[in-house]
Image: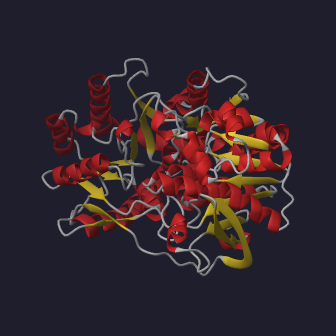
Amino acid sequence: MKKTAYFCMEFGIDQPLKTYAGGLGYLAGSHFRAAHNLKMPLVGVCMLWSYGYYDQVRNKEGKMKVEYIRKFYDFLEDINVKVHVKICNHDVYVKAYRLNSDVFGTCPIYFLTTDIPENDYLSKTISYKLYDGNHLAHIAQEVVLGVGGYKVLKECGEDIELYHINEAHPLPLAFKMMEEHGKDYVKEHLVFTTHTPVPAGNEVHDIKLLKQMGFFCYVPIEEAEQIGGNPFNLTEAALKLSKKANAVSKLHCDTANKMWGYVKDKCEITYITNAQDRNYWQDKKIKKYAEEYNYDKIKQRKRELKEILFEEVANQTGKIFDPDKLTVVWARRFTDYKRPTLPFYDENRLKKILNENDVQFIWAGKPHPNDINAQVTFNWIISKSRKIKNIAVLTGYELKLSKMLKQGSDLWLNTPRVPNEASGTSGMTASMNGSIHFSTLDGWHVEWAEMFPEDSFTIGDGKVLQDHYEAISMYEQLEYISKELYNTEEWWNKVCNCVNDVVKYFDAERMLKEYAEKMYI
C-alpha cells in the first residue's frame, strides 16, 4: 500500500492521552493499533488539546458538570518542529510533538498545538478544547489540523503518497494541496471517511467567513463555491475532492448514497464497516475460556470483572450491586438520537422488571459540553436512579471506564433511532468480552444480526420506527432474558459464541485490510 497520512480531530489511544471525545476517537485508536500490528506505512495527524474534550465530574449535588483541567504529557517527543498557518490573515504558529510507536503500540502520530509562547492569547486558545462550542474557534482548529498538519509532514520529511481524512474536519488540507498542485492532484491523493448521517454532524458555514479565516488557503472563493456551495458544505466538498470515500457500515452506505445523491461529480461511496482492536479491548481470560467453551470458568471470570466494575459503582453512587444479577449497560456518546431514556418509556414496567427479575441497569456517557439538553437528560436519569434501587449512573466516561463497563456487563443496550447510527462500535468491544449486544436494527448491528443471528438480541424489526413499538420489544425481551435465559447453559453457550464470532469480522485487523484493499492501494 501507499504511505498514508491519516488526519483525525481526535485519537482515543490510551487513558492517559486525553485527545478524544468518543467513538470517532476510539475508532482512530483501534485503526492505529491494528495498522501497527500489520506493519502498515501509516502516520497520524491530530490536535494536542490542552484541556482535552472536558472532564465530566460531579457537582455538590452529585450531578454531572463540565470542568476543564489542563493536561500534561511527558511521553510525547518534542521534535523541535514549528510551522505557521494563516488565520484571518494572521500568522499562527503550530508546534508538533510525536507519539512514537513504542509508547502505546501504534503507528506514529503527530500532535499539533498552538498553545505556545510565540502566539498571542487568542491563537493559543485554538488548541485548548476539542470540539469548541465557538464555531470560529472550531474553524480555526480545522485550518490548523489540515494546513498545519500538511506542513508538519513536509517539514519532517514524511514522503506521503495518500492523504486520508477521517470526517471532513481536516478539509483545509485539500485546499492546501490544491493551491500547490491543482485539483486533479487532490483527486488522486485524497480519500475520505464519512461517519454521521445526522445533518447536524455535517458542517455548513458561510463561505465568506471560511475564506476570511483562511480555510481555502489561496484557492479563489469562486472555485471553492463550485466545490462546496454557498453556504459551504464540508462533506459535499470532501466527496467532490476525494478519489474515493467510504461509509462505516453497510446500512450507512445506503443511507449516505441517498443522503448525498444530489451531489454532482462526487466520488464513489463504498463501505468499510468499523471494527475495534481486540488486543486492547478484550479480556484475555474471557477470550481463552470462550474458545474452550468452559462455562464455569467464563462465568467465574465475568463475576470477577463485575466486582471490579461494581467497586466503581459503589464509589461513585453509594450503591452495592450484585454480581449474580443480570447487568444491563447503556453507555456511549450522550445525545438525543441515541435515546438514552428509552428504558424509562414505561417507568412502571421498568421498575417491575428490575424488582422481580434480578436485573440491574447502569448508564454512562458524555454529553457535548454545549448540549445543555443532553446534560439535563443525563442529570434527570441521575435523579431517577436515586429513587430506584437497581439503577446507577456513572460519570467520567473515558477509555478506562468504557473498558470496565464492557468487561463487567451482561447485556450492552443500544437504542438509536434508525437510521441515525452510522456504525457504532461500543457493542463490538462489549461482545468481545461476553456482553451480548441488545440493539435496534441500526449501524453495525444489522450485519452482526444477519451473520450471527444467535449471538445478539434485536429490538424491533427496523421497519416500525416508533418509540412505543420498540420499547415494548425491549421490555418483552428483557423479561424473557432475565426470567428464562440468563445464567443457564444456553446463556453461557451464547456468550461463548458471541466472544468467538465477533472477532471473525469486527476486529480492527479485518478493517485495516479492507482499507488497504479498497482505499489505500
Q: Quadrant of residue 90?
A: bottom right
Q: In this view, does 503 lie above or below 240?
A: below
The answer to whether residue 119 is visible is: yes
Say whether residue 252 is left or right of residue 478.
right
Name the residue rendered at 69%, 35% in the picture. Answer: 222
In this figure, what is the number of numbered marks?
Answer: 0
Q: Which coloring applies here?
A: secondary structure
Going by the image, does 408 lie left or right of 318? right
- The relative height of residue 121 versus residue 416 in the rendered view (above or below) is below
Q: What residue is shown at x 42% (from left), y 59% (from top)?
A: 300
- What x and y, as percent, mark residue 310? 32, 63
Foreground pick, 387 / 505: 387
Tell which of 475 and 233 is nearer to you.
233
Horizontal and vertical percent position of residue 354: 20, 44
Q: In this view, does 348 lie above or below 426?
A: above
Quadrant hosting residue 278:
bottom right
Of residues 398 and 354, which is closer to you in this image?
A: 398
Q: Residue at x 57, y 43 (%)?
A: 208
Position of residue 299 measured from the top left corner of the image (x, y, whole percent): 43, 54
Residue 278 shows in the view: no
Q: Which quarter of the rendered picture does the C terminus lie within?
A: top right
Residue 438 at x, y percent in the picture: 41, 37
